Amino acid sequence: MNIFQALMVSHQTQRELCARLLDAKQATDESRQLFEELKSELAAHETAEERCFYVPLMQHDASVDLSRHAIAEHHEMDEMVEELEELDPHAVEWSVACQKLCDKIEHHLKEEEDKFFPQAGEVLSDEQKEQLAADYEAEFASQRVKQEA
């Protein structure tokens, strides 16, 4: 498995959780649980991705700007999650904020897959791609354990 395949596993999970969250029109225990699952998935993914993908890519001039942009988008999503945590799940604002978060997630994932992955593919060797995947998977698993603790 290479780094792109490893990252796509979490990307698919994020998309599925967003779809399920947005389908849950009523503020229910299920929608709150889906939000918590999405929040945990995002936190683990972002940390592992930054440490095991973006930071190594910042060593290459061609990928510094995209790495910085992606990290900034992670920060924006973190702020959106914090905003959601402050809102009443029964309020209209909560549903609106969920939609905005999921739209931002989709924008970020699409941008990574369409722009960042191809550029990263040009600067990384096949061996590096495989090593980064192993590093990412280990860090992601570690972060998920922390999220559950």
Image (cartoon, grey):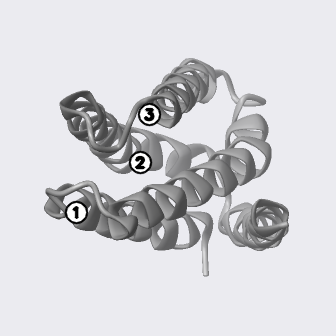
Residues 123 and 108: in front is: 108
Which of the numbered marks, if any, corresponds to residue 84?
A: 3
> Toward which corner of the image does residue 126 lie, by quadrant?
bottom right
Find residue 118 and name its label. 2
Mark 1–mark 3 distance (CA, rounded to whole Å): 17 Å
Percent coordinates x, y for residue 86 in the rendering: 51, 28
Say which residue appears at 60% left-offset and 20% top-offset.
68
Circle 3: residue type: Leu
In the rendered structure, the answer to whether residue 93 lies left or right of residue 113 reads left
> Above or below — where is 24 with respect to 39?
below
Q: Position of residue 103 (x, y in %)?
A: 24, 38
What's the mark number on residue 83? none
Q: Nearer the viewer, residue 147 or 10?
A: 147
Q: Quadrant of the C terminus?
A: bottom right
Q: Nearer the viewer, residue 21 or 43?
A: 21
Q: Nearer the viewer, mark 1 or mark 3?
A: 3
Bin the neighbour count of mark 3 within 10 Å (Cα to Cα): few under 14, some 14-19, many 20 and up. Answer: some
Q: Secondary structure at mark 1?
A: helix
Which label sits in the foreground, 2 or 1? 1
Q: Residue flagged by tag 2: what amino acid is it?
A: Pro
Image location (x, y in percent) of residue 92: 18, 32
Q: Earlier in the sequence, mark 1 or mark 3?
A: 1
Q: Rate crowding at label 2 as few (under 14), some (14 to 19) or many (20 or more) other CA atoms within 10 Å.
A: few
Residue 14 coordinates in the image, percent (x, y): 41, 61
What residue do we see at 52% from left, 64% from top? 37
Q: CA distance from mark 2 to mark 3?
A: 33 Å
Badge 2 or badge 1: first in the primary sequence: 1
Q: Which residue is mark 1?
A: 19
